[in-house]
C-alpha cells in the first residue's frame, strides 16, 4: 500500500495519482529547500508529506504519525534569513559562523515554545502539541493538524 503525501490516505501501490484527492505523488515541493515528501523523521515515526506553509522562521508539513495512525502537522525550525538546506538533503546549515549563536538561540526558543504550548494540551483554543525533538541540525514540533488554518 502507498500513502498519499497530500491527504495521507492509503491506496494500492502502482499509482502516481491519489485516487482519494487527485494529488500527483511525483510533483515537486514548492521550494528546493523543503524536505522531500516521503522523508521519515523522529526515528522512523513521522512520514513527511506535502508542505502546508512556510514563513521566516519555519516550514510546516503534513505528516503521518505511524504510531498514532493519523495525520498531524510538523513545524521545522528553518530561519531562512540565516540558514539553508542543500537541496535534496535533510540537514539544515547556518549561512555563516557569525550566525551560529543566533541560530542556536532561536532553536532553543523554538523548543521552549513547544514545551510551553504542550502544557495547554486539550485546551480548545490552543493547538495540541504531541512531540518535539531535534534532528538534522534543527528542531521539530509535532502538533495536531488543523485543515485550512
Image: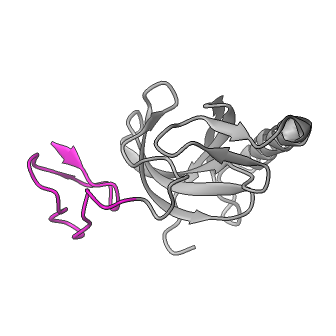
User: Residue at the top extreme?
Assistant: 43
Which span is picked out in magenta?
A: 1-28
Question: Where is the N terminus found, in terms of image quarters?
Answer: top left
**For residue 58, which quarter of the picture?**
bottom right
* Count of numbered badges drawn on the protein: 0
For the residue pair 104 and 89, the one nearer the viewer reads as 89
Name the chief secondary structure element in magenta: loop
Q: Residue at x 36, y 43 (%)?
A: 38
Image location of residue 3, percent across then percent down: 25, 48
Residue 5: within the magenta? yes
Q: Is residue 44 left or right of residue 59?
A: left
For the residue pair 106 and 66, the one nearer the viewer reads as 106
Image location of residue 33, percent across then percent down: 55, 52
Question: Where is the C terminus found, in terms of image quarters?
Answer: bottom right
**For residue 91, which quarter of the picture?**
top right
For the residue pair 63 and 87, the one nearer the viewer reads as 87
**For residue 134, which quarter of the picture?**
top right
Q: Is residue 26 above or below residue 23?
A: above
User: Residue at the front extreme?
Assistant: 96
Q: Is residue 109 above or below residue 133?
A: below
Amino acid at each position: 500500500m502507498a500513502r498519499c503525501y497530500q491527504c495521507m490516505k492509503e491506496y494500492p501501490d502502482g499509482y502516481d495519482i491519489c485516487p482519494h484527492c487527485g494529488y500527483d505523488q511525483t510533483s515537486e515541493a514548492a521550494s528546493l529547500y523543503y524536505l522531500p515528501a516521503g522523508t521519515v523523521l523522529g526515528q522512523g515515526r513521522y512520514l513527511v508529506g506535502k508542505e502546508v506553509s512556510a514563513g521566516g522562521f519555519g516550514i510546516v508539513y503534513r505528516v503521518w504519525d505511524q504510531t498514532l495512525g493519523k495525520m498531524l502537522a510538523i513545524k521545522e525550525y528553518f530561519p531562512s534569513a540565516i540558514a539553508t538546506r542543500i537541496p535534496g538533503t535533510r540537514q539544515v546549515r547556518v549561512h555563516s559562523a557569525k550566525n551560529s549563536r543566533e541560530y542556536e538561540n532561536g532553536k532553543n526558543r523554538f523548543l521552549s515554545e513547544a514545551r510551553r504550548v504542550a502544557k495547554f494540551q486539550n485546551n480548545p483554543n490552543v493547538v495540541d502539541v504531541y512531540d518535539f525533538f531535534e534532528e538534522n541540525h534543527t528542531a521539530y514540533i509535532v502538533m495536531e493538524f488543523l485543515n485550512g488554518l
